[in-house]
Image (cartoon, rainbow, N blue to C red):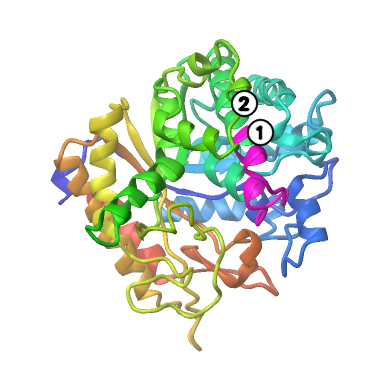
Amino acid sequence: MGDTLHPMFTWGVGTSAYQIEGGIEDGKGESIWDRFARDSPMVDDGVIACDHYHRYRSDVALMADLGVDAYRFSIAWTRILPEGRGRVEPRGLDFYNRLIDELLGAGVTPWVTLYHWDLPQAIQDRGGWVNREVVDAFAEYTGVVADALGDRVTNWITHNEPWVASMLGYQQGVLAPGVTGWDNGLGAAHHLLLSHGRAVAEIRSRVADARVGLALDCRPVSAASDRPEDLEASVHFDGFRNRWFFDPVFGRGYPTDMAEVYERLGRWNPDWVRPGDIETIGTPIDFLGVNYYTAFQVSAGREEVDDSGIAPGHPALPGHTEMGWPIVPSALADFLVRVQEEYDPPSIIITENGASYSDAPDRHGVVADERRIAYLASHVAAVDEARSRGARVDGYFLWSLLDNLEWVAGFSQRFGLVWVDRQTLERIPKASFFWYRDVIASRR
C-alpha cells in the first residue's frame, strides 16, 4: 500500500484555536463563540479548553513523537485584532510566532487556517458575515497575519467549512452566533466565499511561494431509493450541501438549479452578488482542502436536512461513530474522484478526517480505542483507492491531535489521538496515536 503514495505526501494532524487554546488573557478580545457559550445552554466553554495556550511546547513535543510532517492550526482572530479591525495586539502575534518557531524546531511544518468560526463579537455586533463590510475586515486581518507569519508559513487555508459557519451559524442558528433565516445564511455564505477570494490575493501579495486554499466540508449523498422523488431529493441535497460552495470556488458561479429554487422560495437575493464577486470567489487556488466524516442517504422531504453538526450524545450504534454518523469510507474515495473529475484542483488535501469515540484510560493508563483505529485505517485505504483512480490527493490531516471542545457537544465527544483529562489536563496518547505513528513511519 505504501508504494501508492507520492514521496511528497504530507501526513499531519489538526486542531482549531477555540477548541484547544483557552488562554483568554493577554488582550484577547471576545469572539462569537465566547458570547454564544455564555448565553446558550452549552455545557462547556473555551475559557480553558485544553490550555494549549500555556502547554503548546509539550503539545508540539507530542507531534514530534508522533512523527507528523505538518500541523494544521487556526489563528484566533481576536488574539490579533481584539475589536476585529484596527488595533493589533502584539501579545497575540507573539504567541503564534512562538508556536511556529517551536514547530519548526521540532521539524513540523505549520499550516495556518485563518478562520475556524471564531468571528470577533465586535464584528458580529455590526451584522457579522451578513454585512458585506466583513469582507474588508477579513482582508485586513489576513494582511496583518500574513505580514507577521509569512516569513515562516507557506501553507495557508483561508476558511474552514464555510457551509457550517453560514448554514449552522446563520441559517439554523444551532452554532454561534445563533442567527436564523435563509437570507442570513445565504448572505453569510456569499461573504465568506467572497472574503476567501480576497484573502487569497492578500496572502499572495505578501508571502513568497505561498500555497493557498480553503477547507470545504463535504457530505456525499445517495438516494434512499430509485423512486424519482428520492433521486430528485438527492440532487437537491448535493446542491444545498456541496455544489453551492464547490462550484463558485472553482469559477463556475452558483449552481443555476439551486439559485432558481432559492429565488423562487424568496431565500436568495441575486443583488448580493456585485460585479466582480464571482471572479474574486473563483480566484485559482493551489490546493483544495476536503473535510470528510460521513455520508448521507436522502429521501424526499429531507433534501435540506443535515443535522450532522449536532451531537446526539448516545453510544455509537453499529456502523456509526459516537456522533451518530454512519461510517462510509467508500463514499470518501468516490467523492475525491468526483471532485478531481468535475473541478480538477491542482492538489487535494484531506484537511480533516476522524472519529469520535469515548474510550477512556483503563487502570493501567492505556486507552484502547480500537474502533477509532478501524475507522482511520478504512479511510486511509479509501484515500489510497482514490489516488489509484486518479485523484491528486497529496496530504492527510487527521482530526484531531487532542480531545478538545467539540463546540456545542463540549467535551462529551472525543476525536483526539491524545486523551485529555478534563480535571488535570494531563495528556495520554491513545492506541490510535501509536497506530498513526506506525502508519506514517511505514509510508516513508
Q: Where residue 117 sits in the image (x, y, percent)?
A: 64, 44
Q: Magenta span has 171?
A: yes
What residue lies at 25% left-to-right and 39% top-to-bottom?
338
Does residue 211 show up? yes
Q: Where residue 437 sits in the image (x, y, percent)?
A: 35, 57
Does residue 94 show up? no
Q: Which amino acid does label 2 sit on?
A: Leu
What residue lies at 70% left-to-right and 24% top-to-bottom?
132
Q: In this view, does 157 lie to the left or right of 339?
A: right
Q: Residues within 10 Å of mark 2 (few under 14, many from 20)?
A: some
Q: Which amino acid does label 1 sit on?
A: Asn
Q: Magenta span has 217?
A: no
Question: Outermost residue, bottom direction?
Answer: 363
> In which quadrant of the rendered image does the C terminus lie?
top left
Looking at marks 2 and 1 on the same chain, the residue that comes earlier in the sequence is marked by: 1
Read off the residue under disc 2: 149
Could you say which quadrant of the image residue 146 lies in?
top right
Q: Residues within 10 Å of mark 1 (few under 14, many from 20)?
A: some
Mark number displayed over residue 203: none
Tell me whether the residue at label 2 lies in contact with that at label 1, contact meaning CB atoms closer than 8 angstroms: yes
Front position in the image: 99 or 24:
24
Q: Where residue 223 sits in the image (x, y, percent)?
A: 29, 56
What residue lies at 70% left-to-right and 20% top-to-bottom?
136
Mark number displayed over residue 97: 1
Could you say which quadrant of the image residue 379 lies in?
bottom left
Highlighted range, magenta: 169-187
What residue lies at 56% left-to-right and 63% top-to-bottom?
310
Judge whether 357 appears above or below 121 on screen. Answer: below
Judge whether 444 appears above or below 144 on screen. Answer: below
Could you say which quadrant of the image residue 341 lies in?
top left
Q: In this view, does 175 lie to the left or right of 70?
A: right
Tag 1, which secondary structure? Answer: helix
